[in-house]
Structure formats: C-alpha cells, structure tokens
Amino acid sequence: MTTTSRVLLVSGSLRATSTNSAVLRTARALAPDRIESVVYGGLGALPHFNPDDDTDPLPVVVGELRVEIRNADGILFSVPEYAGALPGSFKNLLDWTIGDDRPGSIYEKPVAWINASPRGAVNPHEQLRLVLGYAHATIIEAACTQVSATTAMISDDVLIADAAICEPIAKALTILASFRLSGGESFLRATQDGRPLDLRRV
Ligand SMILES: Cc1cc2nc3c(=O)[nH]c(=O)nc-3n(C[C@H](O)[C@H](O)[C@H](O)COP(=O)(O)O)c2cc1C
C-alpha cells in the first residue's frame, strides 16, 4: 500500500524573488514526512506551445514536464496576476499539458492552488479553474487557499516567515496530498459536505 504522496509544486512566476515561488518552497519545507513535494523548475525553459511540436519526439523539457506530472499524485499551483490574467509563460505550460494522453497525465489529476496575492487576483484564478476544467483535472476545492504574501515576508532562507500564512499553506498541501491516500471520492464527498477535516487522520 502506498503511504506517501508526491505533490508537484508549480509556480507561475519566473521572478527570482517571487512571492508565489516562496509560498511553494514554504509548502515543501513544512511538508510532513509522508508528503514528498517537488518544486517544478522548468517553466522558463519551455518552448512556445506549438501543436506541430506536440508529437514524438517531444522537446526534451516538455517530456520532462509531462513525466513530473505523471509521477505526481497531485499538483499545487501558485500564480500571480499579470495584466488582469494568467502569466503568458504559465498558460504556455498549461497548454503543453493538454496533449498528453498517457496514464497519469493532468487528466483527472488532483490539483489545487494557493492564491498568494494581497490584491485578490480573481481573474487569473478564474482562468486557472477554466483551463484545469478543460483539462479534466480534479480540482480539490478544500485545498484551494487564499493567503496574502508579500516580498517583505520572505526571509533570508527564501521561505515565507509569517506564521499566520504558513498554517494555511501547510494545510493546502496536506489536503491535496491526502486526496489519494484517503480514498479519493469519499474524501471529496467529505470535503463537499463541509465536514471538518482531521488532518492528522487524512
Ligand atoms: C507586467 C505586470 C503586470 C501586472 N499586472 C497585475 C494585475 O493585473 N493585477 C495585480 O493585482 N497585480 C499585477 N501585477 C503585480 C504582480 O501580480 C505581483 O507583483 C505579484 O506579486 C507577482 O508575483 P511574484 O511575486 O510571484 O513574482 C503585475 C506585475 C507585472 C510585472
């Protein structure tokens, strides 16, 4: 029986001092032993999506992205708002996920996001929901979280130092990672019923 869960952490920002990337690094740092979390680092290296190139042999970095997704039990995103929308480089990543028809692709993959914007960033998260729905990913609503992260909260170890934010970040990762460990559909029903989750048990 599988007792660990692997979560792929995908930031939508390429900025070196990105708050969204810091939020995901913090999630990784706070993860309990049974959750293996991996920060995806290839966003900036992905070629522009072109359906003509979505064929074997795939560009190497695209193949690596798809392997990372297939190897993950869930994907946790954190993306900024650029000009009222998803960042173009991040939408490019999502476009590359659509054509993977192998088992374990983004299709039915448990996914969630942390909205780290202090300004709400409603639009990109509505767009993220739309695209993930198109991809038939399984959105784990109970893991989707809003925090308010600022550059000032990033400490010298490039993690978020604010304890009030760390708690919901850790909770988002734990709930997402627990989806498969806890029997999928019954877990979803419990969260949709609004019953409080005992995170020590999931
Ligand atoms: C080109 C550009 C456009 C932006 N557009 C918006 C916007 O429409 N709405 C908003 O709330 N913030 C906007 N921002 C601010 C970023 O979303 C904000 O700085 C965010 O923290 C960046 O994420 P990061 O820290 O992970 O890099 C914009 C920033 C840039 C550079």
Image (spheres, rainbow, N blue to C red):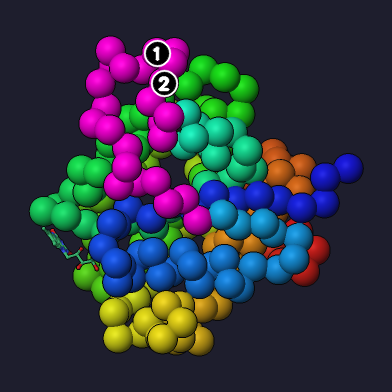
Report the residue marked by disc 2. 58
How many numbered dots are placed on residues in this image? 2
Q: Is residue 146 magenta?
A: no
Q: Residue at x 11, y 53 (%)?
A: 83
Q: Quadrant of the C terminus?
A: bottom right
Report the residue marked by disc 1. 55
Helix, strand or loop at label 2? It is: loop
Q: Position of residue 142 (x, y in %)?
A: 55, 56
- The residues bearing labels 2 and 1 have C-alpha atoms spaced at a distance of 6 Å
Q: Residue at x 54, y 49 (%)?
A: 8
Q: Residue at x 36, y 17 (%)?
A: 54
Q: Residue at x 32, y 30 (%)?
A: 95
Q: Amino acid at mark 1?
A: Thr
Residue 136 visible? no
Callout 2–callout 1 Cβ contact below 8 Å: yes
Q: Position of residue 119 (x, y in %)?
A: 22, 70
Q: Which residue is at the far left?
A: 83
Helix, strand or loop at label 1? It is: loop
Q: Amino acid at mark 2?
A: Leu
Q: Which residue is at the far right?
A: 1
Return the residue nearer the eye: 192 or 16.
Answer: 16
Binning the other alpha carbons within 10 Å of mark 1 as few (below 14), some (14 to 19) or many (20 upward) gives: few
